Image (cartoon, grey):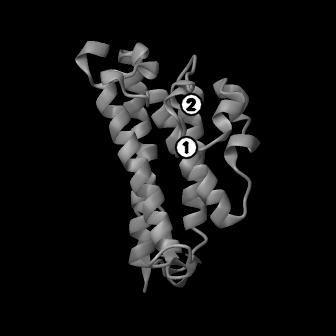
Amino acid sequence: MGTRRSGWGRTVPGMSIALDLLIDAASRPREALDTLRQGIAAAPRALDAHPGGHDNSVAWLLWHTGREIDVQVADLSGQPERWDGGGFAERTGLGEAGAGIGYGHTPEQARAITVRAAEPLLEYLDAAVGSLLEYLGTLTEADLTAVIDEAWDPPVTRGARLVSIIDDAAKHIGQAAYVLGMPELR
């Protein structure tokens, strides 16, 4: 391994290809924030819309994406969640409703995630992605193969968990972008 250029623009001596790819993939939600901002500006009522009667709005998707990254990275890294430390419960207006993560939400709980403004959610998502990128910067390739959850068959490695976090975030950001592009919400 020599000096490599990571996907998010910093030179990292001895970085592995696997970590470089994870960092590049993990930075994608952050890169999507400007597009999301433009979509919300063009279709502000889409933030809390429920196209096709689906329970998850764009606000829910953005909140959940930030929460799933934040909670899992805090668990892996031992660092505090950005939700609490950054005052995002208050800034988003979600308070206690936003303290969960969204997995297993009932339709009523999902529909309770509504916001007055998108910017605090976007800032939270940016902060959560920042935590993920910071955490990835502390890892070695050997760290990726460490088993962190033996409750699954096969047991889950740190690398597999990180891929899962990034995959879930990419799916939800894509869903939010799709809804924001719906002509009937503009």
Q: Quadrant of the N terminus?
A: bottom left
Closer to the chain start, of discs 1 and 2, is 1
Q: Quadrant of residue 174?
A: top left
Q: Nearer the viewer, residue 62 or 1?
A: 62
Graded by Cα atoms within 10 Å as few (under 14), some (14 to 19) or many (20 or more), the crowding at tag 2 reads some
Graded by Cα atoms within 10 Å as few (under 14), some (14 to 19) or many (20 or more), the crowding at tag 1 reads many
Say if mark 1 contacts mark 2, CB within 8 Å: no
Q: Which residue is mark 2?
A: 109
Query: Which residue is farthest left?
Result: 183
Q: Is residue 117 above or below residue 167?
A: above
User: Residue 115 location, x and y as percent?
Assistant: 57, 21
Please tell me which residue is depicted at 72% across the width and 64% down the height of the picture.
78
Q: Nearer the viewer, residue 60 or 6?
A: 60
Amino acid carrying mark 1 in the image: Gly
User: Residue 41 location, x and y as percent?
Assistant: 41, 18
Amino acid carrying mark 2 in the image: Gln
Q: Which residue is mark 1?
A: 66
User: Residue 88 location, x and y as percent?
Assistant: 68, 34
Please tell me which residue is depicted at 43% across the width and 46% down the height of the picture.
29
Secondary structure of residue under mark 2 = helix
Secondary structure of residue under mark 1 = helix
